[in-house]
Image (tube, grey):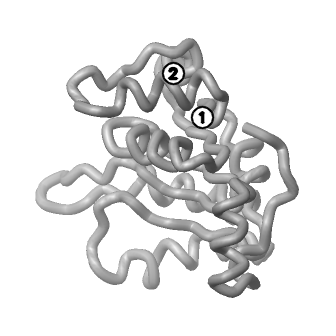
Amino acid sequence: MEKKTTQNIMSMDLDEIRIMVKKHGINVCIIGIGRIGLPTAITFANSGLPTIGVDINQELVDMINSGNFPLKDEPGYEQLFEEVIKTKKLIATTKIEEAVHNSDVIVLSLPTPMIDKIPDYSALQSVAEKLGNLIKKGSVIVVESTIEPGFVENELIGIIEGSGKL
């Protein structure tokens, strides 16, 4: 991913954001590059935005960076994947610190499995604890994971803000 100065997107008006998108001046980080996150990362990268995917699975990260598309049953994405890898618009890493530090938009695409009919948000909670110490003021965080109404407002924001850095 190109190293650019990160933007304070929250202080921009809509026209300024549009200009930054057209100039490919917004860096995107997708945390969790599995079945949902990888196609999302490919889509952002295909639009021209420098995109970095983060995952704890080193084998998956290595596979992606070497140009091997891991989702063979995902129609239409393999060709896009090859292009964004070749042009280095998409790279993958296990280093959340570096990825988040260099990003303006952070998308959380983490698993939220059901255990005894109760959603398990531990992956989201764990990442949120790290984000509080890593994100910069004005970053945009998007939760792509399946969550129940109120989870972001009632829990996730508090975890992220818990570091006192925001």
Residue at screen point 72% across, 66% down: 20
Say what secondary structure mark 1 lies in.
strand
The percent position of residue 134, horizontal first and vertical second, equals 75, 57
The front one of 160 and 85 is 85
Identity, as a three-letter code, of the amino acid under mark 2: Ile
Calculate the distance from the C-alpha at mark 2 to the C-alpha at mark 1.
9 Å
Rendering quarter of residue 96: top right
Say what secondary structure mark 2 lies in.
helix
- Residue beneath disc 2: 64
Residue at screen point 47% across, 40% down: 42
Rendering quarter of residue 10: bottom right
Count of labels shown? Answer: 2
**Relative to 163, is 77 on the left or the right?**
left
- Residue beneath disc 1: 90
| In the depicted structure, whether residue 45 falls above or below residue 67 | below
**Relative to 59, is 102 on the left or the right?**
right
The front one of 110 and 22 is 22
| In the depicted structure, whether residue 35 falls above or below residue 14 | above
The percent position of residue 140, horizontal first and vertical second, equals 62, 70
Mark 1: few, some, or many residues within 10 Å (few <14, many ≥20)? many
Residue at screen point 66% across, 45% down: 50
Identity, as a three-letter code, of the amino acid under mark 1: Leu
